[in-house]
């Protein structure tokens, strides 16, 4: 995961301030030629800020996303499922690591980004502020949440910023694996006992709308995406990505024999697309602002892990310093 | 050697992996830093994989139609045969790391010996698992050194963990009828024969970590006979919840 409306805040599109117009034009020309921008290249301040914010929010999402899924590792119902889930959550941690590294190439240390998250100043994908209540939620997250993440992230593999684009290529490969495993889990439930079917339906009921929200507000309301489009940080609009996701996912849900919690969902013969009912953006905005079922718990868990681990990080740093001193002393002898 | 002894032995190995893997997996998302979240998840994953192979082999030996999942999810605590150290609660990071280190050192010695087992299935499992165990040992050993020789606080915590867990190391070298039968049949090493190698590893790392090895003294026992600590029942209540709540369901 997971770039949702990660371009939510008012844009840093105000590029002009401080940036030399000739340099800006040359930069835009490079982007237009589909050249990759690398860490040591000149870039507009707004481009740098936008990327730091987007990549770090993406990294935070991977890390916070470990919590709802980690919630079921100790209750996975078979050894195979336990291994799949452990491997997935481990992958998500790895995604966080690559993404923090990609953001660090823009000059912001990981510790500073983590501090911003813990201080409540940085966002992460709101999808992880929903609870995982049954085992089926693990399937639904893989199928829907990783599925939506792939739709969002495949275009980012062509992002103009080289380190981000390269991180996304690797990440997308793993996300599609997660998506298939999640769907396979759902399939098993859908073919199972009446209780398992109930679990699967209940999970779809709770995760469907939040998954659609992961693509962020409609383009009609998005004020700043044009600058990000020009810079090729963003390459496909929120609504287009959402539509692609709906078109891909609805037939999969029907194959499972499940019902989508949207009475207006129907196939439009004329356009060849599935059309859905209105999304409740008030719920999205409320959760983004901090009032979701698990916002406080998720942040409390991250803060507790960080605080409880402080003595460990201090010990590692103290040991590294001691060892370096000893090695210098030996070299001097 | 009877099939019963082989079954018992495979349970000892497999249950130890399953139970310790479960404990380590409890850290997921809560570790002191991101690299450790990933490393601990990886250890948990390896141990669960080993449990799957060992319990699968146990189930085949038993020949009563059970599989690895039935053994993991449908036995009660008294039928578990893991080392007691594996079920000790995580405690702080020092506790988790010291537990892992003492176990990894034993597992490396054990698997290395089992690669030469006359039992080809067991030798095959050990051949794959010994590489994982060596990797785990490098990870846990490095942390024991960092914590022991880090700050005053980390040193105090690491020493406290070592003192608390030491009485659980005696079980690793216990001999009984089962182990004697397997040793006689050249299936498994005499547990006592693993002690010198284990001691060398432990002494070397504790020395580097400037930690004090606890005095030899009274040792906990019971895991091989199904006499466990209170902690295991709670773990199984969590681990086995779904297969118990929905009997017969396939996942
Ligand atoms: Fe991810
Ligand atoms: Fe994923």
Image: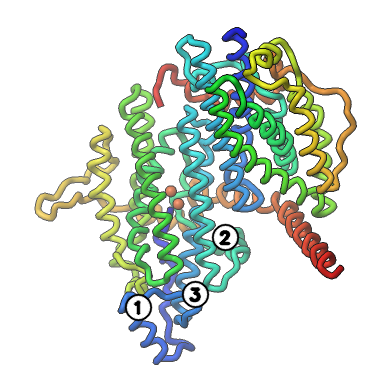
Please determine if labels 3 and 1 lie on a single subunit: yes
In whole angstroms, how far apart are the C-alphas of marks 2 and 1? 30 Å
* Marks 2 and 1, the one that precedes in the sequence: 1
Give the residue at x 29% y 58%: A241
Q: Nearer the viewer, residue A19 or A13?
A: A19
Chain under numbered label 2:
A
Q: Secondary structure at mark 3?
A: loop
Nearest the camera: B78 or A302?
A: B78
Q: Residue B127, image x and y in percent? A: 57, 32
Q: To which quarter of the image does residue A263 belong?
A: top left
Secondary structure of the residue carrying numbered label 2: helix
In the depicted structure, whether residue B99 falls above or below residue B12:
below
Marks 2 and 3, how far apart in space? 23 Å
Q: Disc 3 and disc 1: Cα gap in Å?
A: 14 Å
Residue identified by numbered label 3: A39
Q: Is residue A132 visible?
A: yes
Packing grade of label 1 (10 A; few <14, some 14-19, many >=20) is some
Image disc number at residue A31: 1
Instruction: Kindly identify which numbered label has been placed on residue B15.
Output: none
Neighbourhood count class around disc 3 (C-alpha, 10 Å): few under 14, some 14–19, many 20 upward: some
Total label count? 3
C-beta proximity under 8 Å, tags 3 and 1: no
Residue at the disc numbered 2: A117
Residue A196 pos. (x, y %): 37, 26
- Tell if the residue under mark 2 belongs to the same chain as the one under mark 3: yes
User: Looking at the image, is mark 2 or mark 1 nearer the viewer?
Assistant: 1
Q: Is residue B209 above or below residue A152?
A: above
Decide if ligand 1 comes within 8 Å of the CB at mark 2: no
> Which mark sits nearer the N-terminus, 2 or 3?
3
Circle 1 chain: A
């Amino acid at each position: 995961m997971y770039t949702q409306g990660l371009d939510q805040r008012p844009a840093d599109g105000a590029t002009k301030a401080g940036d030399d117009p000739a340099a800006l034009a040359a930069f835009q020309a490079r982007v237009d030629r589909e050249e990759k921008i690398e860490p040591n290249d000149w870039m507009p301040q707004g481009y740098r800020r936008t990327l730091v914010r987007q990549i770090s929010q993406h990294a935070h999402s991977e890390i916070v996303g470990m919590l709802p899924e980690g919630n079921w590792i100790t209750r996975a119902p078979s050894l195979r499922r336990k291994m799949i889930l452990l491997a997935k959550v481990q992958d998500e941690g790895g995604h966080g690591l690559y993404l923090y590294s990609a953001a660090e190439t823009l000059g912001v240390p990981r510790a500073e980004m983590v501090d911003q998250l813990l201080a409540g100043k940085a966002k992460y994908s709101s999808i992880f502020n929903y609870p995982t209540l049954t085992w089926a939620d693990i399937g639904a997250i893989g199928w829907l949440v990783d599925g939506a993440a792939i739709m969002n992230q495949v275009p980012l593999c062509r992002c103009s910023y080289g380190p981000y684009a390269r991180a996304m290529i690797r990440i997308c490969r793993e996300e599609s694996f997660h998506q298939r495993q999640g769907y396979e889990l759902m399939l098993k439930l859908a073919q199972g006992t009446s209780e398992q079917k109930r679990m699967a339906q209940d999970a779809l009921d709770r995760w469907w709308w939040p998954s659609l929200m992961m693509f962020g507000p409609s383009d009609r309301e998005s004020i700043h995406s044009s600058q990000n489009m020009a810079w090729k940080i963003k390459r496909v609009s929120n609504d287009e990505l959402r539509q692609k996701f709906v078109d891909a996912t609805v037939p999969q849900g029907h194959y499972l024999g499940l019902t989508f919690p949207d009475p207006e969902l129907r196939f439009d013969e004329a356009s060849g697309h599935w059309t859905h009912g209105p999304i409740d953006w008030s719920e999205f905005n409320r959760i983004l602002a901090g009032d979701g079922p698990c916002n406080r718990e998720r942040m409390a868990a991250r803060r507790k892990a960080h605080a409880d681990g402080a003595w460990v990080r201090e010990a590692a740093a103290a040991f590294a310093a001691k060892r370096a001193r000893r090695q210098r002393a030996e070299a001097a002898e | 050697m009877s099939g019963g002894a082989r079954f018992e032995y495979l349970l000892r190995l497999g249950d130890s992996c399953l139970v310790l893997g479960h404990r380590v997996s409890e850290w997921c998302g809560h570790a002191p830093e991101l690299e450790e979240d990933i490393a601990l998840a990886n250890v948990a994953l390896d141990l669960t994989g080993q449990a799957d192979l060992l319990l699968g082999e146990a189930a085949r030996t038993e020949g009563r139609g059970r599989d690895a999942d039935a053994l993991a999810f449908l036995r009660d605590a008294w039928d578990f045969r893991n080392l007691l150290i594996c079920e000790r609660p995580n405690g702080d990071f020092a506790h988790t790391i010291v537990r892992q280190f003492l176990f990894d050192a034993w597992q490396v010695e054990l698997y290395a010996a089992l690669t030469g087992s006359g039992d080809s299935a067991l030798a095959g499992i050990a051949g794959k698992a010994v590489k994982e165990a060596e990797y785990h040992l490098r990870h846990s050993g490095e942390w024991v050194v960092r914590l022991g020789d880090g700050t005053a606080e980390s040193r105090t915590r690491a020493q406290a963990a070592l003192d608390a867990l030491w009485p659980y190391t005696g079980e690793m070298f216990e001999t009984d009828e089962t182990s004697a039968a397997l040793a006689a049949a050249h299936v498994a090493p005499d547990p006592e024969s693993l002690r010198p190698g284990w001691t060398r590893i432990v002494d070397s790392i504790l020395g580097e970590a400037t930690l004090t090895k606890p005095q030899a003294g009274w040792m906990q026992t019971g895991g091989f006979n199904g006499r466990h600590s209170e902690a295991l029942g709670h773990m199984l209540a969590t681990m086995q919840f779904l297969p118990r709540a929905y009997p017969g369901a396939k996942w």
